[in-house]
Image (cartoon, helix red, strand yellow):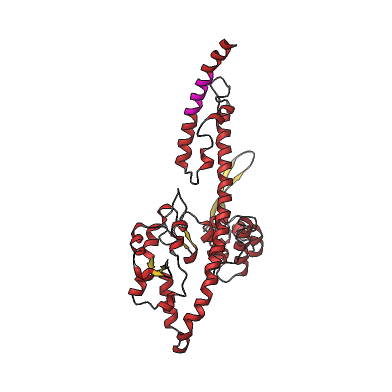
Amino acid sequence: MTSLYYESNKKNSTFVKNPIPHSFMKCYATDIPTEIFANFCEFLPPQDLFSLVPVCKSYRDILYASNSTITEQIWRNSRRTYFPSMIEPPLEGMNEREYTVLLFLQRTCQVCGMRRDEMPVPLHWEFKIRCCEECFEKNVASHGELIKEKTRRPLLSTLPYISKDRVSTHFAKKAWPQNLKSKVSDPLTLTHNRLRIYWRPDVEKLLKRFQALKPKERSIFPDQESKNLLLKMQDFEKRRQAYTIEMKEKKELVRRTRFAREMEAFEREKNSDGTPKYHSPMFGYCQTHQKPLNFFIFTEKDWENWRRQMNKEYYLMMERANSFKPIMCNAL
């Protein structure tokens, strides 16, 4: 099998046959040694590492290797460089890549794969997953429901949970499903005056693990695991606080950068005669001038409405300023 390549010179340009088979033609960009590829990846944020995965099989094999110290180093260095507050090792049972996916893929549900464009998908630290409201509702169960299903109480005391005192703060707006409100009134769910919600896949894994134990080991299993639960819950809270602060700072920086870019776009607009279309100091008198910086969530549609409102308010302010000038002149 041969291929064609383009040969050109000063007189003419022709297509000639290349006698080299395709099997011997290599792409040097994908034939990089693993150590050198790891050095390149040290300067890339996690979002760029994700974009390298579908490029070719060799990149995917390096970035998705399950038992590779180089793969772990690539994801760890990227996470710690671009997310300095999250310097702790990954959560129990997760590798560096899975932990980075949990932190940075904020718009995708890890259960159904649905992508959001307006709001990030809620991250549930206790369950080590990021999922949408529908998937959350399908995969959680209250303490009372599990007891009715004949799940042993001592086993439930070993599982991470979301408690009643965190319902209003842990879920933003619609992240707490309406159908779960009925579970709050269930008297069996109130354990130590707290509503406990569990992740069903975690319960199933725990039951399989418990059934695989020997009879002697089953008697001491709940006591051993429940001692570690308090440390796990404290670690989840610590990571949650650090993550919230980091994300708030990043969102503030991104929003201020976008705000400055939008204002520069207003200043660059020209009239047909080449004069500036807007007098930039007048924007400071518009009521909606600081609106993008004051709202926690500001979508792309909000930016479009903000630009139209700014344009409308600017001309109203200019009309008032022009009508105010003759009055001042006559008074003088």
- As rendered, which of 264 and 67 lies closer to the eye? 264
Magenta segment boundaries in residue numbering:
312-321
Measured along the vertical axis of the image, is residue 203 above or below residue 300? below
Q: Is residue 87 left or right of residue 133?
A: right
Q: Which residue is located at x 60 percent, y 60 percent?
A: 86
Q: Which residue in the rendered view is the most extreme toward the front?
A: 193
Residue at image coords 43%, 77%: 155
Quadrant showing the C terminus: top right
Q: Position of residue 143 (x, y in %)?
A: 39, 70
Where does the image place residue 118, in percent across and percent down from the top left? 45, 48
Magenta segment's dominant SS is helix
Queried whether the magenta region covers residue 320, the answer comes back as yes
Query: In the rendered image, is residue 79 in sight?
Result: yes
> Which of 127 and 62 lies nearest the eye of the viewer?
127
Q: Is residue 10 left or right of residue 3?
A: right
Q: Is residue 55 visible?
A: no
